Image: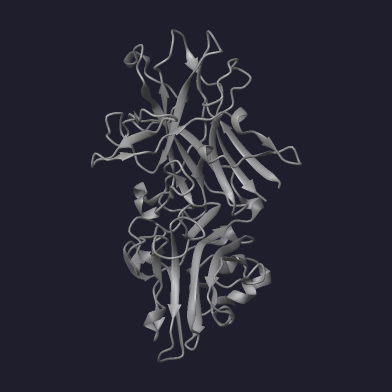
């Protein structure tokens, strides 16, 4: 399987992340996603008037006679799994009085709701609207139409789910759908310059059934994407300023001290979706420097004696951990082998959220095209399930409402064990954060 690799080696970081409230214009603009930025959705309230974004959307507003057609946010704790993240949107329609029903995500003119408004989405001309749907019957696929409309609210571009599916529809499974934003769907750049509903659907009232939606996004054409599609920025924990390296305060460390947190964290922004199967990794690449034989972990190498190194660990979170005094940032270690790291939550409970750092040499594999492949769970920071919150295949989470300011951007915090350190300078030549896309 061919892989696309985007690698950032981090000793000096030059890229930065924009936290502008208005996400329109990003390469990937999310209508409903827990991994990509766009409309900021409150996952527990429907309908919801967006309060935090200049996008100002009115979310999931129903019309027509079938009140049961108003969708609901669903947690995968109770029902079948989402395509991405921990939630999906379930539409259950039942017959009633009237001729049609529908819902949509509507731009509005004022913060917190108000009158309908229009937004210029012409940057996405030539691109696509892509989403996943999971139906329980084929009739709803043939009768339920989805799409967009302009500010006139009378020039709908609606297409049945059946016509948008990229392959044969599988019932009770996730199916991909694509709307091309070009002439093949009677869509022009001028039409996109005044969009009212950035996602909508409509059906006859006799349409009965259940369909789930997930990862609804607008995507720019590949030739129009900006260069900052994947960025990693080192920032100081103390003041959140951009930093040029990852450091430890040596004045606080004495012989025999165990785990100490680094003074910086790494912030990730993902604005790229060439493939729906992707993952972000973190690891070191020090095989050209390290001359010892330890293969159980990776870390900081003694520059005076490169046969010696000390372990590093990492943690991915959406939390803003303000200092090493924050109880959720304290690093503990259980007295067992292999060691289990933990942080202490505000309630005093332990949360095993730290991972041993690994080196590329520990998990490197080559496929038939001589391109690296990996399935080592311990180096995965983030994939479509969410950020990797604790060791194990199932501990992934990404509820968008929990992110500071509603902006999805995982943070990687780092630590090192100085318990066996000897005098000298310790460093890693290459700390790598990498995006891998399956074609």
Residue 302 vs 38, above or below: the answer is above
Is 148 in front, or is 413? 413
The spot of residue 202 in percent (x, y) is 50, 80
Q: Nearer the viewer, residue 348 or 41?
A: 348
Looking at the rendered structure, the number of numbered marks drawn on it comes to 0
Q: Say which of 102 and 21 sits in front.
A: 102
Q: Is residue 59 visible?
A: no
- Residue that appears at 31% across and 63% down: 112
Question: Relative to residue 69, is residue 177 drawn left or right?
Answer: right
Residue 365 sits in quarter: top right
Task: Please determine whether, in this image, residue 102 is positioned above or below residue 108.
Answer: below
- Report the residue that reaches farthest toward the front: 336
Near-viewer residue (18 or 342): 342
Instruction: Determine the residue positioned at 36% across, 14% down.
Output: 256
Q: Where does residue 138 sit, x and y in percent of width and height?
A: 58, 79
Residue at the spot x=66%, y=43% of the render? 4
Q: Is residue 412 left or right of residue 253?
A: right
What's the residue at 53%, 26% (across, down)? 296
Please give left or right for residue 9 compared with residue 97 in the image.
right
Q: What coloring was used for the rendering?
A: one colour
Is residue 116 in view?
Answer: yes
């Amino acid at each position: 399987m061919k892989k696309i690799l985007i690698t950032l080696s981090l000793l000096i970081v030059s890229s930065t992340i924009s936290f502008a409230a208005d996400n329109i214009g990003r390469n990937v603009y999310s209508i409903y996603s827990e991994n990509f930025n766009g409309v900021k959705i409150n996952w527990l309230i429907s309908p919801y008037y967006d309060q935090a974004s200049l996008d100002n959307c009115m979310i999931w507003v129903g019309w027509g006679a079938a009140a049961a057609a108003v969708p609901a946010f669903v947690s995968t704790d109770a029902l079948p799994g989402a395509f991405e993240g921990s939630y999906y949107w379930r539409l259950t329609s039942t017959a009633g009085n009237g001729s049609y029903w529908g819902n949509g995500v509507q731009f509005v003119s004022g913060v917190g709701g108000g009158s309908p408004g229009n937004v210029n989405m012409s940057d996405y001309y030539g691109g696509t609207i892509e989403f996943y749907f999971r139906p329980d019957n084929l009739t709803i696929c043939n009768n339920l139409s989805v799409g967009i409309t302009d500010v006139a609210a009378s020039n709908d571009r609606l297409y049945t789910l059946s016509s948008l599916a990229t392959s044969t529809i599988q019932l009770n499974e996730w199916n991909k759908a694509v709307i091309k934003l070009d002439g093949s769907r009677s869509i022009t750049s001028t039409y996109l310059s005044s969009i009212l509903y950035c996602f909508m659907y409509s059906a006859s009232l006799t349409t009965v059934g259940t369909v789930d939606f997930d990862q609804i996004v607008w995507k720019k054409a590949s030739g129009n994407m900006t260069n900052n599609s994947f960025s990693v920025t080192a920032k100081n924990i103390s003041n959140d300023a951009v930093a040029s390296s990852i450091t430890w305060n040596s004045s606080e460390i004495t012989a025999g001290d165990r785990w100490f947190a680094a003074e910086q964290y790494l912030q990730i922004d993902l604005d790229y979706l060439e493939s729906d199967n992707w993952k972000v990794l973190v690891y070191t690449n020090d095989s050209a420097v390290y001359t010892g034989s330890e293969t159980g972990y990776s870390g900081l190498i003694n520059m005076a004696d490169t046969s010696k190194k000390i372990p590093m660990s990492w943690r991915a979170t959406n939390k803003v951990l303000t200092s090493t005094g924050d109880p959720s940032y304290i690093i503990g270690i259980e007295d067992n082998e292999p060691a289990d790291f933990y942080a202490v939550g505000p309630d005093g409970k332990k949360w095993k959220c730290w991972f041993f750092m690994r080196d590329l040499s520990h998990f490197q594999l080559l496929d038939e095209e001589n391109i690296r492949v990996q399935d080592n769970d311990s180096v995965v920071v983030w994939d479509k399930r969410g950020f990797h919150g604790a060791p194990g295949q199932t501990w992934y989470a990404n509820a968008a409402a929990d992110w500071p300011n509603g902006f999805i951007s995982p943070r990687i915090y780092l630590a090192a064990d100085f318990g066996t350190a000897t005098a000298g300078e310790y460093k890693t030549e290459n700390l790598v954060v990498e995006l891998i896309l399956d074609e």
